[in-house]
Amino acid sequence: NAGVMQNPRHLVRRRGQEARLRCSPMKGHSHVYWYRQLPEEGLKFMVYLQKENIIDESGMPKERFSAEFPKEGPSILRIQQVVRGDSAAYFCASSQGISPLHFGNGTRLTVT
Amino acid sequence: KNEVEQSPQNLTAQEGEFITINCSYSVGISALHWLQQHPGGGIVSLFMLSSGKKKHGRLIATINIQEKHSSLHITASHPRDSAVYICAVLRTGNQFYFGTGTSLTVIP
């Protein structure tokens, strides 16, 4: 029973490029959360999705960031035209309603 | 003001000491999670609580819903317990809010 799978584990992008981060939730989980952890800071909520729906994106920057969780396939967090300030660890977590929250190992994005 | 406050922010203990980390929240919740994050590593859910007390090995978590407070206790602490411990609350609507974490260092 695989846990939450995130890939890639490390991603290096130059300023202006696009970053695509993938998250496959645990089997049976339909709730996906994306969090960002900036260096030396705590976890910050970005977006909460259920299959084909964005439930809460109040933590997402208004521009350049988007997320989706299609009916088939992983959830994708997309960052367009990356800037150095986007460098962070991006964690995905999944749950099924009120159930233990399971985290992926994160994707560490470095923008050069 | 954060919806979730943790204390202390940093904690250093000698091996074998009893450790308590506190979490207070200001919103109505349906559940509270304690998470552990090792340096450079992923995040693991230790406990999910909606009432009372849970125990797993040397770890004990308690929650008082009326007082909006939870504690995580570690008995007989060990250097491998060194990590950041994060309190997360689940609000109605399935929205999670996180504390900023408590960085624990256990010295041999």
Image (cartoon, rainbow, N blue to C red):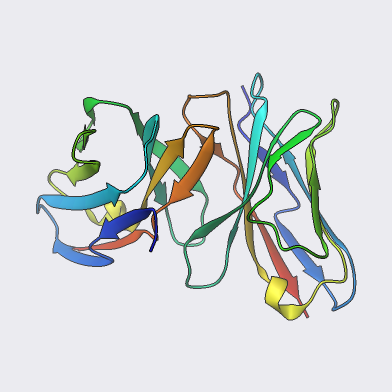
Q: Where B69 falls versus B105 (above or below)?
A: above
**Measuring 15% from the left and 63% from the top, which residue is drawn there?**
B13
Q: Where B7 falls versus B44 (above or below)?
A: below
**Measuring 40% from the left and 29% from the top, which residue is drawn there?**
B30
Q: Quadrant of residue B89?
A: top left
Q: Residue lying farthest top?
A: A28
Residue A40, position in %: x, y? Answer: 47, 72
Q: Quadrant of residue B31?
A: top left
**Measuring 65% from the left and 36% from the top, which residue is drawn there?**
A32
**Measuring 82% from the left and 72% from the top, which residue is drawn there?**
A82
Q: In the visual, does B107 lie left or right of A34? A: left
Q: In the visual, does A72 lie left or right of A23? A: right
Of the pair A79 and B58, the residue shown nearer to us:
A79
Residue A20, position in %: x, y? Answer: 83, 55
Q: Where B30 falls versus A47 (above or below)?
A: above
Q: Quadrant of residue B52?
A: top left
Q: In the visual, does A23 lie left or right of B67? A: right
Q: In the visual, does A74 lie left or right of B65? A: right
Residue B53, position in %: x, y? Answer: 20, 28
Of the pair B63 and B76, the residue shown nearer to us:
B63
Q: Residue lying farthest left?
A: B17
Image quadrant containing the C terminus of chain B: bottom left
Image quadrant containing the N terminus of chain B: bottom left
Residue B39, position in %: x, y? Answer: 45, 61
